[in-house]
Amino acid sequence: MRLRWFLVIALAAVCTLGAACGDDSGDSNGGGADTGDGDGDSPGDGDGDGGDGDGDAAEVMCVNTGEINADCPVKLPPFSGTCAPRGECCHRASNSAKIDMLDPDEPAVLEYRLTSVVVTNHPDTVSQPVLLQTAATRADTCAGEQCLLWRFTLPRSGGEFVAGAGKSTIGIGRYNCDGTYSFYGPTAAPDREGLTDPARWEAVEADMMVDPDLEGRDARVIPFGDNPNRRFARSPFTDPAMDMEIDWELVSQGFDIIDIDTADAGEDCQGTRSGEDWIPAGQFLSYAPLEPNSHDITNQISQTYCQLLAFGILPEGMKERDCLELPRCTPGDEGCDWVKLPDSLCPETDAERDLFGCHLGAEGNPNGDTDYPDDLNCTQDAPTEVADPDSGSSAGQCCDPLGASETLPACNAYLTLTDYTAAAVEITDEPKNEIAPVCEI
């Protein structure tokens, strides 16, 4: 079985170019403003400072455990209280503590924010040092679009996790400046040139089959027919130099968590913070389709994301190089301008999305990637029925990275592999339809 969880952004790619408690009204999911009673002894606060002693309802209360971690790269408030970053991964809430407060048959809700992501298979393009530093800064401050949120609802009976139906919601969101986070809602996205769907940033909830007797990705699976990850997902990037206006939007497909800790230890922390470094615990993948990423030009490097993936950071005077029209050639060959060729095939039409999802399709490791698989799960012929690897079939048709084959389609996307750390947070029940505020410090 394969674990495929939809992301309303290309987590890997987003964090590279850029890469929770109750809401303002106190009606958070899984423990919010009502977890403290105003006398300073809210559950699991670790230092007795959870309540303000005067019943001030404006102070958000988080269900949290452990001591405040001085190694956390905290740049946003609160810096104290129950919503301050705590424990070995800087969690602003505790999923395990919230589970302990549930009735025996009540479902558990695990909520996380990704605190660090590192793309591992694009060292010469999106993983150049200047871009990784930008990603780290955005992740530390949870800047605008850079709040990447996960929520999993798991069935329980008699106080234990059981096999059955669950829910998965993964998407871009925002920080609310009070220790809580929110997904973006159905009217959050403003009109931009060529983009008029106000719900294009909205997280999508998917049905998920859960089996606690299994581990990792096999323990939580979204069936192929229910998985929305074959559709385009968009994530926005704001520009501080433009008064936080939208700079560009990235398009992704095929998000899939490869490795995740589904044991008790992973309830609050997926990875740890050690001094100034994040120690990743898992990995996910996503795909960046060429054509949708060939329109928006980011102010940071004055080129499109498609150009970045194909050619790296282009020098001035070469910013017009076209990732769709320039004839493809083998990277490293004399006179070849391509730094990396597309290696994957993603569905482009509804009919294709009904049959297959994004998959690695370039045979022979055309880019010389480290740990590239010798054998790909693709076929020479296009599928005529559902290609679902979870059911033992191929992932779909192979593709030609050079786009010169008479029998195979040209590869039309890039695979991105990302190591991540994640920490428990409090995500509000209600999504937000406005871009994240600028937090006062």
Image: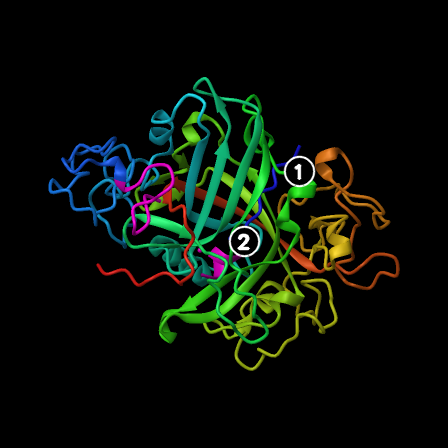
Which of the two residues, 153 or 143, is positioned nearer the viewer here? 153
The residue positioned 33% from the left and 44% from the top of the image is 27
Report the amino acid beneath label 2: Val
Compare marks 1 and 2 and give the one earlier in the sequence: 2
Quarter of the image for residue 409 reads bottom right
Question: Which quadrant holds the C terminus?
Answer: bottom left
Residue 87 x/y as whole percent: 30, 35
**Camera sees residue 127:** no
Which of the two residues, 199 or 242, is positioned nearer the viewer here? 199
> Which residue is most to the right?
406
Report the amino acid beneath label 1: Pro
Residue 319 x/y as whole percent: 57, 77
The residue positioned 50% from the left and 38% from the top of the image is 282
* 440 part of magenta stretch: no
Indicate whether 356 appears above or below 335.
Answer: above
Quarter of the image for residue 311 reads bottom right
Query: For this view, does 59 lie left or right of residue 305?
Result: left
**Mark 1–mark 2 distance (CA, rounded to whole Å):** 18 Å
Residue 205 x/y as whole percent: 54, 45
> What type of secondary structure mainly makes up the magenta span?
loop
Quarter of the image for residue 71 reads top left
Q: Please, which colouring scheme is shown?
A: rainbow
Residue holding disc 2: 8
Task: Give the magenta-colored segment's residue range.
Answer: 13-33
Residue holding disc 1: 223
> Which residue is most to the bottom?
317
Query: Of the numbered discs in the image, which one, if any, rests on residue 410?
Result: none
How dense is the environment of label 1, judged by Cα within 10 Å: few (below 14), some, or many (20 and up)?
A: many
Indicate whether 212 appears above or below 183.
Answer: above
**Camera sees residue 172:** yes
* 20 part of magenta stretch: yes
